[in-house]
Structure formats: C-alpha cells, structure tokens
Image: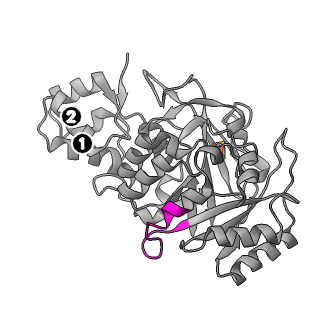
Amino acid sequence: MVRKPLIGMTLGELESVAAEAGLRRFAAKQIARRLYVNRSQSVSEMTELPKASREWLEEHYCVGLQAPIAEARSTDGTVKYLFATRGEGFDFLDGGAGGRDVEAVYIPDRERATLCVSSQAGCRMGCRFCMTGRQGFHGNLTAAGIINQVMAIPESRTLTNIVFMGMGEPMDNIEEVLKAVEVLTAPWGLAWSPKRITVSSIGKLDGLRRLLDETKVHVAISVHSPFKQEREDLMPVEKAFPVAGVMGVMKNYDFAHQRRLSAEYIMWRGVNDDLRHADALARLLKGVDCRVNLIRFHAIPGFDHVTADTETMERFRDRLNELGVTATIRTSRGEDIEAACGMLSGKEGAVEKE
Ligand code: SF4
C-alpha cells in the first residue's frame, strides 16, 4: 500500500492534505503540532481529528519516521547513523536510481551537539577527494528524508546545531532542502533558530542564490584552492561556477550581523598548503565577511594527496589572521568510524548493523 510520509511537509502542504481529508484548514496546524511538537509516531494518535478523517488519513498517509538501521560509535563520542531510504510504501529518494542508504553524523562537543545531515544519496559533483562523490548519484532526498535524520536519532531532542554537510550537494537538491529548512525553522515546525543551521555548498550559484534569498541560515562554501586550475583539478564544479564569481556574489549579502559565511578549506601537503595559497585566499575573500575553517584530510582509497601537517596548518592560519581573515583549524571528529569530512559512503558495511 502506498502511503506518503507526513514528516517533512510544510504547513501549506499539510493544508492540502487536510482539505483532501475533508478537514478544515486549521487542522493542518493540529497535524503539524502532532508531527513536530508531540512527535506522534502514528496518525492514530491524532485524536483531536474526527474519526472518519483520521481513518482516511491513515489509509493514504503515515507519519514516516524511520529509525536508523545501523550505527557506528567513535571513541570520541561521534556516532554515524545509517538510514534506509525506503519505508513501507514510500521512498525518501527522488530522481535517481534509488535503493541506496544515507548517513548522518552526530557530533557531541562540550555544550554543543551537532548533527551533520545528508541531502542526497551519492552526489553528482565528482569532487576527487570525496567518497560520496566517488559513488555517483543515486537520488535526491525528499524533505521527509532530511527531516527524518533530525527527528529519528535518539539524541534528536538534545541537538543544538544542524549542518548540511553530509552526503550530496544541497544546492543540487534545492527545493527539498528549502522545504526542510522551512520545517526546521517555522514556528509551526521544529522552531529552530536559523542561526543554529549551516548549509554548505561547493558554490552552485543558482541554488545558493535561492538559499540566501529565501532563508536566514548560515552558509559554508567549500573553497579548497584559491587558484582556478588547481581547484578545477580537485572540484569539476569550478568550470561552471568559478569560486571567484561565487565570492563576488557573496559580496552582495550581509554576513556581518545575523548570518555567517565560512570558507571550508581542506589542506593537502604540498598541494594547497603554502603561504602563496594563504595570500591568494585572503585576496579571494577581500570585501566579504567570511571566516575560514582549515580542515585536515582523511585519506580515502584512490586519492594520492595526504593531509598537511599541524605546523604547516598553524602557519597558514596565522598568515590568514595577519592578513585580517579569521581562520581556525577545525577539530577532526569520527575518523575511526569513517564519519569525518569527505568519508561518508552510505554503503552497507561502513556502519555496523545493530
Ligand atoms: Fe558532492 Fe560534497 Fe562530495 Fe563534492 S564534496 S562530491 S559536493 S558530497
């Protein structure tokens, strides 16, 4: 029996569902409350709805919450969760070959508890240093599939931050990502502050413009090299969306007040870790309020470059700071369970079955 999941639906969509079920418009708010505040597990719990409508709803819709099918725990407290993308009668994937699992990573850190969510199964951007990119594209996650990652993990209610930095390029699935951000931040939804959400992108400008215009979330751009040819060798997207052009567009937005922009920069020894790169990166970011996160690299099969050493990274960071660009070295988490940046594969076996 095909039943559509209700989680991930916006208020507008729930209003259409309510109309289909023969309910008055305000019932959409009651359903939203049940889904996102009470976290009901089934339609039958929505006892404030008339019995006949509830029964109709149960026939055609389900709440759709799907617990992770496996998890791996790091010695540093990081947990990687594996989610199936097929539920009973519905699919969290759209527009691809389907049938693949996705991963989310829970990262506790003193007073913060961050969840890194996936927006696609696989990815079509083909960044050479990324395990997800290696596996090709298997489909866009629906907003339900994104929201499920946030709501179905055991630590859901203790989360303080959400980052869209898992599998996939969020701008390549912008409609569903925007919907998920709406559900996360709306007062009728999960009521998160947009200041606690960061969406990353490799610079796919069409989607990025919409994200900036239609939400207030923080934005992170993966830069990895300030030089065109070098970046193109690492990230084919540079051809279509040169990072210089992306940063030019960023100048039109305000990142000095409510919303933050960061540049993500993975450092490889002898590739992009000398001071010439630091100087060019500072020039690239001139006129944009942007902090830089320097990231260690975790080796993946078939990619020869190795991470820069700590001393070189510190020198690079200090140079950026001297040039007036705030830069920090990001702590690496979950490497032992392949949960660190660029390591997500969503493959069976990468996460232990319970
Ligand atoms: Fe896709 Fe991001 Fe991996 Fe690039 S780094 S292939 S955009 S998931």
Which image quarter has ligand 1? top right
Q: Where is residue 286 in the image (x, y as percent from the top left)?
A: 60, 73
In this rendering, position of residue 201 left or right of residue 131? left
Query: Most extreme residue toward the top, as rendered?
Result: 1
The range drawn in magenta is 248-261
**Does the segment drawn in magenta span residue 155?**
no
Q: Main secondary structure of the magenta part?
A: loop
In this rendering, position of residue 166 left or right of residue 270? left
> Above or below — where is 168 with respect to 247?
above
Task: Check residue 16 in the rendering and tell me which mark sits there, or answer none.
Answer: 2
> Above or below — where is 107 with respect to 321?
above
Q: Nearer the viewer, residue 346 or 269?
A: 269
In this rendering, position of residue 10 left or right of residue 297? left
Q: Type of residue at label 2?
A: Ser
Q: Position of residue 4 (x, y in %)?
A: 36, 27
Q: Assign a secondary structure to mark 1.
A: helix
- The residue depicted at 71 percent of the width and 47 percent of the height is 232
Q: Which of 78 and 167 is in front in this view?
A: 167
- Please say if the residues under marks 1 and 2 sit with CB atoms less than 8 Å apart: yes
Colour mapping? one colour
- Quadrant of residue 283 in the image? bottom right
- Neighbor class of circle 1 (other Cα within 10 Å; few <14, some 14-19, many 20+) is few
- Name the residue beneath numbered marker 1: 12
Q: How many marks?
A: 2
Q: Which of 337 and 311 is in front in this view?
A: 311
Q: Position of residue 134 (x, y in %)?
A: 72, 35
> Mark 1 vs ligand 1: CB under 8 Å?
no
Q: Where is residue 29 in the image (x, y as percent from the top left)?
A: 21, 47
- Neighbor class of circle 2 (other Cα within 10 Å; few <14, some 14-19, many 20+) is some
